[in-house]
Amino acid sequence: MRIGKQASIVRGGGRVWIDYPRARDAFEAYLCSLELRETEVVLMPNYIGYSPREGSGVFDPIVNSGVTCKFYELDKSLTICLDSIRHCIENFDVKLIVVIHYFGYIDPAYERVVELAKRNDIKILEDQAHSLFTDIHGGVSGRLSDASIYSLHKMLPVSSGGALSLQKAEDGYAPSLVSKLCIEYDIASLVKTRIRNHGYLTRRLAGHGSVLEVLRPVLEPGIVPQTFPILIISYDRNALYQKMNDSGFGVVSLYHTMISEIQANAAFQTNYVAERILNLPLHQDADEESLDLMCETLLNLLYAN
Ligand SMILES: Cc1ncc(COP(=O)(O)O)c(C=O)c1O
């Protein structure tokens, strides 16, 4: 085939984007569109949070749509246990596997999960509430699955907004809020800052393994982090969360409390993570000086214990 002077392929990825108020609304709409029977199962990862104020952005759509859900397991570093997915596929009539790109990072088993799903005629939905930039800028998520959901207010300075993207929807393209925001904001420089700040935090927090564990020290090409997750080893995480916020550092815990269905299973290693996780901010408002002060405050608290 020859290559012309002007490119002619309009939408290489062939995805269509649909706006929703929040990611959870997009997820619920997608679940309802599948029209699953009671015996048909949606597989979810066993790391899902809940808060009395916000409910569960991931699990409320499952409850509201009335679909049958089973959990596959993640380990203590929040990576997928493929055997657990295989076991579920062998034992249940799985129709959909949900993969969550926690904090913007991609699981090492992501492509193998997709292969496994395709081989068994199972759909994949990527929860990209944290990985909008890993998808649209990094290009390493959102392309192998049937659908993705996004939470715009988690990644951009907007108060609300969600989206659903669907593969192979040749018709019906309409301008979405995502496409508008991608032009309005300088995504490339937001991404550059996040990646630079990840590198800074990795270097600054290295060598403190007795008090904390850095969960994602390596950024593979294309990954754009939402936050910098660490596990707190030697201090009460809730007290630390409070002290850091009181000192002016907007750390969060994604997630501090698991939904009851996960809490009830003592064998789930993700309960260990939920008790210890702290996510440090690395967005565009953070410069090297403020990151340094945040790390100093954190380490002073941890070592004073
Ligand atoms: C991984 C993940 N997916 C989905 C959601 C829901 O996002 P939204 O608040 O836009 O509904 C959240 C947050 O609640 C989340 O952390």
Image (cartoon, rainbow, N blue to C red):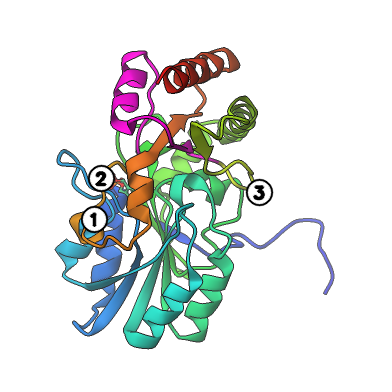
Q: Tell me, yes or no, whether the highlighted magenta stretch contains residue 251.
A: yes
Q: What residue type is labelled 2?
A: Thr
Q: Give the range drawn in magenta.
A: 225-253
Residue annotated with mark 3: 220
Does the numbered disc 2 mark a residue whose Cβ is under 8 Å from ligand 1? no
Cβ atoms at labels 2 and 1 below 8 Å apart: yes
Residue at x 69% of width, y 61% of height: 8
Q: In which quarter of the image is the C terminus?
A: top left
Disc 3/disc 2 C-alpha distance (Å): 29 Å
> Which mark is on residue 263?
1
> Which mark is on residue 255?
none
Residue at x 57% of width, y 42% of height: 224
Cβ atoms at labels 3 and 2 below 8 Å apart: no
**Sequence order check, earlier mark of 2 and 1:** 2
Residue annotated with mark 2: 257
Q: What element carries label 2?
A: loop
Residue 288, percent from left and from top: 59, 17
Q: What residue type is labelled 1?
A: Gln
Residue at x 37% of width, y 79% of height: 88
Q: In this view, does 146 lie to the left or right of 217?
A: left
Instruction: Decide: few, some or many residues near mark 2? Use Cα within 10 Å; few <14, some 14-19, many ≥20.
Output: some
Q: What element carries label 1?
A: helix
**Sequence order check, earlier mark of 3 and 1:** 3
Instruction: Work out whether residue 108 or residue 204 is closer to the camera in this orientation and state it.
Output: 204
Q: Is mark 3 on a helix, strand or loop?
A: loop
Residue 52, percent from left and from top: 15, 41
Residue at x 49% of width, y 52% of height: 77
Does the numbered disc 1 mark a residue whose Cβ is under 8 Å from ligand 1? no
- Vertical arrangement, residue 39 with respect to residue 56, above or below: below
Residue 265, percent from left and from top: 25, 62
